């Protein structure tokens, strides 16, 4: 399944906030066997957001958004998705009750009128309740594709994913397989030289795939395998590592969590 992650918020484009949500989502999704092929960040502009989401709908099976579910006029993710899908909304009383109780408990005051905006849910969407905030997440099936709308605050997004989204995805795509990665660490050789040595191996790759990275005085060779289960993926990685070592063994000083400083 092809996945595109769309993070929203002008503050991300301005560099005011570090985009940790996309890193968390990508790591988790890849580990579960989903192919995260695109990352897109868009500001709080209706036209540009619609363009980004329509493009994502054309090239991905699952579109996951982060942010834009708050109570202000600038929070437009849900409304834009509803416009694209031609979906109306209704006031979900259970969600509104949760929002009301959460705000009264946190502040001692009744919620503002604009908080009601967060309790309006697209017809046909599944609700991912927010246990540590006010904005509910949403799962909306649309013409064989899936929109998943998540809140922007990292603590809310991660709590919702761990408790609700990941179990739903695994249940929906139980036979989807998994993805495992392994990273070999090299020193004493440059990236271009490693690329030259491994050119034939890299050109013939399919599963596992091989990627090279240069970082802080070392070269990383990341091997990524996709299989039906962990044992099969591990076997693929073992075979790939053995093949790569035939070419670069003299430069390898460790695998995965190895530290250059500790050598």
Image: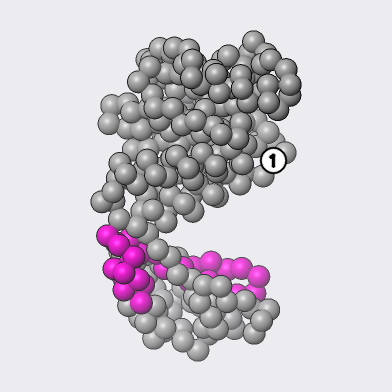
Kindly identify the residue that appears in the image at 49 percent across and 30 percent down. 129
What x and y, as percent, mark residue 212? 49, 68
252 versus 10 height, above or below:
below
| Residue closer to the observer: 4 or 218 | 4
Left or right of 195? Residue 114 is right
Task: Give the left or right position of residue 26, taking residue 18 as reference.
Answer: left
Residue at image point 59% right, 83% down: 188
Magenta stretch: residue 223 in it? yes
Helix, strand, or loop for circle 1? loop
Reply above or below: 105 against 31.
above
Residue 20 at least partly seen: yes
Which region of the structure is painted magenta?
A: 212-238
Q: In this orientation, does residue 44 appear? A: no
Asked if residue 154 lies in the magenta stretch, the reply is no
User: How is this picture coloured?
Assistant: one colour
Of all residues, the one furthest to the bottom in this rendering is 250
Q: Residue at x 46, y 16 (%)?
A: 92
- Give percent across and percent down for residue 190: 57, 76
- Residue at numbered disc 1: 17
């Amino acid at each position: 399944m092809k996945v595109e992650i769309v993070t929203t918020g002008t503050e991300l484009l301005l560099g005011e906030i570090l985009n940790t949500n996309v890193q968390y989502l990508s790591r988790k999704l890849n580990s579960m066997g989903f192919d995260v092929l695109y990352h897109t960040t868009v500001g709080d502009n209706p036209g540009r957001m619609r363009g980004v989401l329509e493009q994502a709908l054309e090239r991905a099976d699952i579109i996951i958004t982060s942010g834009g579910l708050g109570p202000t006029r600038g929070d437009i993710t849900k409304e834009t998705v509803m416009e694209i899908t031609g979906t109306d909304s209704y006031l979900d009383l259970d969600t509104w009750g949760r929002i009301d109780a959460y705000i009264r408990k946190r502040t001692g005051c009744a919620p503002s009128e604009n908080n009601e905006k967060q309790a309006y849910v697209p017809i046909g969407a599944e609700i991912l309740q927010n246990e540590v905030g006010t904005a509910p997440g949403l799962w909306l099936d649309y013409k064989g594709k899936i929109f998943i709308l998540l809140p922007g605050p990292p603590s809310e997004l991660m709590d919702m994913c761990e408790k609700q989204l990941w179990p739903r995805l695994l249940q929906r795509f139980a036979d989807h397989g998994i993805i495992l990665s392994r990273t070999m660490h090299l020193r004493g050789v440059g990236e271009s030289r490693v690329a030259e040595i491994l050119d034939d191996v890299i050109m013939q790759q399919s599963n596992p795939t091989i990627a090279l990275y240069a970082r802080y005085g070392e070269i990383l060779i990341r091997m990524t395998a996709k299989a039906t289960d962990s044992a099969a993926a591990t076997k693929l990685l073992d075979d790939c590592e053995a093949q790569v070592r035939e070419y670069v063994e003299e430069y390898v000083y460790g695998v995965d969590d190895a530290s250059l400083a500790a050598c």
